[in-house]
Amino acid sequence: MAAPAREFKVGDHFGWPVPDPTDTSFYTHWAERNRFQVGDSLVFEYENDSVLSVEEWDYFHCDASNPITAFDNGKSILNLDSPGAFYFISGTAHHCSRGQKLLVEVMSPQHHPVPESPPPSLLAPQGISPLPMSPSPEAFSPVASSPYDSIEEDSASIMLSSSAVMAPFATFLVVLLLAL
């Protein structure tokens, strides 16, 4: 079942003006805080300005000369009718270069959230215990003291770190092979 379509007011209570010079990434951060689905819409509210839907190149170069669509009525509603990237800039000179631009990524209808736990087929079969994540520190205690002890300890730390990283991967491979 598809989620109901939602309307997003661009910039929330701030709307669609030029952002503060100390926060030119305002619209980028706003878009990152939201999840856009096919069927949702964006509401741009502004005064003495405009909003242009543009191609990627025009967005990154703040080029308003060839918009896909252009609005200047103060309240513009744009439907997100397909998955992918949508690019918007202000049509007023120098506003885009001062941060008044928006990139929205619309998720495809088939997009599913990543499961919080692995599927049952990837879990360890009964009777098999996972490999230990890291050996005890006592296993790597130096025996003698020499000027090279710190170098050897650094090497041992690197080997310990890499083996701690590899252990879960090895466990996964063993479980995967056993499942086949």
Image: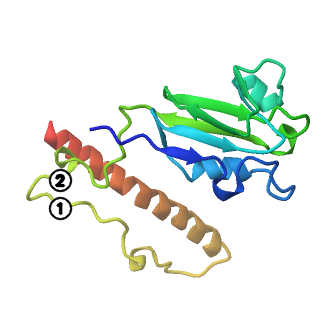
Identity of the residue drawn at 86% across and 40% down: 95
Looking at the image, residue 14 sits to the left or right of residue 166; the answer is right
Looking at the picture, does residue 112 appear above or below residue 147? Answer: above
Q: Label 1 is placed on what type of residue?
A: Ser
Find numbered disc 1 in the image and state the secondary structure of the residue it sits on. Answer: loop
The three-letter amino acid code for the residue at tag 2 is: Ala
User: Residue at the spot x=28%, y=52% of the render?
Assistant: 171
Asked if 80 appears above or below 43 in the picture, the reply is above
- Pointers 2 and 1 in contact (C-beta within 8 Å): yes
Q: Number of marks in the image?
A: 2
Q: Label for residue 124?
A: 2
The extreme left residue here reads 127
What's the CA distance linking mark 2 and mark 1?
A: 8 Å
| 93 versus 147 height, above or below | above
Question: Could you say where residue 20 lies in the image, as x and y percent from the top left?
Answer: 83, 56
Q: In the drawing, what numbered circle is on residue 48? A: none
Looking at the rendered image, the quarter that the C terminus falls into is top left
- In the image shown, does 126 or 96 lie closer to the viewer? 96
Q: What percent of the width, then of the height, locates residue 132?
A: 29, 65
Going from N to C along the chain, the mark reached first, 2 or 1, is 2
176 vs 154, left or right, is: left
Crowd tier of the residue under label 2, counting other residues whose Cα lies within 10 Å: few below 14, some 14–19, many 20 or above: some
The tag on residue 129 is 1
Q: Position of residue 42 (x, y in %)?
A: 58, 40
Pick the residue in front: 72 or 68.
Answer: 72
